[in-house]
Amino acid sequence: MRSALVAVLSTFGLLGCGSSPDVARPVVGDIPAAIAALETRLGGGLDYFEVSADLRGVTMVLAETEEDSSGESLGMFATTFRWEDGQLTSDGETLSAEGATFQASAIEISPESLFKQIDGELSTPVVVDVAIQGSGTGSTVIDATVVNEKGGTLLVLLSGDGRILGVQAS
């Protein structure tokens, strides 16, 4: 696994001594506040398709199931909410959707250490976003989109403490 990572990183010219901790990073530390704001507004125990952080804020894709009067499911729907600058917003649009979901309690992420291994493996990595998605079992999968100055893009699968679990070039 490690040799495959080194091969992919070398191909993209990303292997180096490490990066500066001063680079802009997705605001993963805002995820708890964003979820708290949404669950305060709508109630706890919500199901999510995805929670993602970029350089400016947090986007939450809420999973909702519509039921008829007998309790029969009519389908799943997604509504997107955005947390930015301490404000929770939504365009209110609800779209038909399907996929794995999770609850906020399944998110196990350490903002302090999430990027340490990426920093150690890559020279000047620019992490543009981090997405947390449902795995199908109620747990989550975490990935980061990393680009370099030459335009190469990697999708890096991470554990909540920042261990690199896999890399896919795109």
Image (cartoon, rainbow, N blue to C red):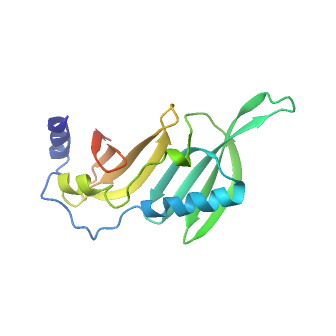
| Nearest to the observer: residue 159 or residue 14 | 159
Picture residue at 48% right of the left edge, 48% below the top: 107
- Spot occupied by residue 102 in the image (x, y as percentages of width and height): 55, 41
The residue shown at (20%, 40%) is: 5
Quadrant where the image shows the C terminus: top left
Q: List x then y, in percent, for residue 58.
A: 52, 59
Query: Can you say which quadrant of the picture contains the N terminus?
Result: top left
Which quarter of the picture shows residue 4?
A: top left
Which residue is pictured at 54% across the width and 72% down the height?
85
Above or below 53: residue 135:
above
Name the residue furthest left. 17
Q: Is residue 150 visible?
A: no
1 horizontally vs 83: left or right? left
Residue 157 spot, x, y in % from top left: 34, 42
Q: Is residue 25 left or right of residue 64?
A: left
Q: How many marks?
A: 0
Tell me: residue 96, above or below residue 16.
above
In-front residue for pair 31/98: 31
Residue drawn at x 23%, y 57% as measured from the top left: 119
Q: Say if residue 48 shows up in the picture.
A: yes
On screen, residue 65 versus residue 145, left or right, reads right
Estimate the x, y position of residue 136 in percent, counting from the top left.
Answer: 51, 31
